[in-house]
Amino acid sequence: MNIVQVYLTSDTVGQVIVVGLAVFSLIAWTVMLGKHFELKRLRLLNHSFDQRLRDERSLLDLPESFRQRRSVPYADLFADAVESYWRAAAIGKEKSRDSTRARLEHAENALQRALARQTLRYESSMIFLATIVSGAPFLGLLGTVWGVMSSFSAISVQQTASIQTIAPGVAAALLTTVAGLVVAIPSMFGYNLLLANTRRLITEMENFASSLADRLELESE
């Protein structure tokens, strides 16, 4: 079977859909590979930062350099929590009100905001892959229905019809369905794997935030 020949026998709509699906496939593979390496890099950076914090005896007195690595999710959580803690402490001092509980509440609120922000960062581009997984087969089906409809419309104006006249048009119509599945199937597997990795990283980040809150509470006491 000559795919190129089948493509050339397709009408304009079928060819446009196949080219569009090829572009979507290229974009999907780019997104999947980029997201995979991004998550892998962030996980290594997170574990490295977590190990550095474990080696420190006090978190509240760490130098400002620890709070400047905002590109690392764990460092972003740490920076927001510590900065909110000392900001609450400064406000409490100005008002002559020493409330450790208020400081910790400010730090925990900052942790929740940072968690939400980093969760969105982890899940970025996932909606695009989900759209390709669900939309590519329907685009292929649209091309197939259109191609079959065009083939039968062409046959209706002929005096006789045989398998030789029907087959090329039907084959060209089915090409769009094949193209849609070729795009959707790898994207589906890639999306599921990336989703599992994303959920694992989010769970690890939530555990880190909980551990960080516990350490701040112990140091405050």
Image: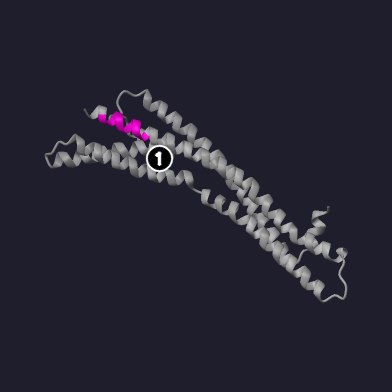
Please state the extent of the stretch shown in magenta in the rendering. 209-217
The reply to whether residue 177 is in sight is yes
Report the residue that reaches farthest toward the left: 96
Q: Residue at x 17, y 36 (%)?
A: 99
Residue 207 is situated, as x and y percent measured from the top left of the image, at 39, 33
Q: Which residue is mark 1?
A: 70
In the displayed structure, 135 sits above or below 107; it is: below
Residue 156 is situated, as x and y percent measured from the top left of the image, at 80, 74
Which SS class for mark 1? loop
In the displayed structure, 192 sits above or below 157; it is: above
- Answer left or right for 110 relative to 122: left
Dot 1 crowding, Cα within 10 Å, few <14, some 14–19, many 20+: some
The reply to whether residue 65 is in sight is no
Front position in the image: 27 or 135:
135
Residue 154 is situated, as x and y percent measured from the top left of the image, at 80, 72
- Answer left or right for 177 relative to 36: right
Res 216 → quadrant: top left
Residue 31 is situated, as x and y percent measured from the top left of the image, at 58, 47
Q: Residue at x 34, y 42 (%)?
A: 112
Front position in the image: 80 or 69:
80
Taken as a whole, is the magenta stretch helix, strand or loop?
A: helix
Q: Residue at x 54, y 52 (%)?
A: 128
In the displayed structure, 160 sits above or below 163; it is: below
Quadrant of the frame with the C terminus: top left
Q: Residue at x 69, y 59 (%)?
A: 19
Front position in the image: 216 or 76:
216
* The magenta stretch spans residue 143: no
Q: Amino acid at mark 1?
A: Arg
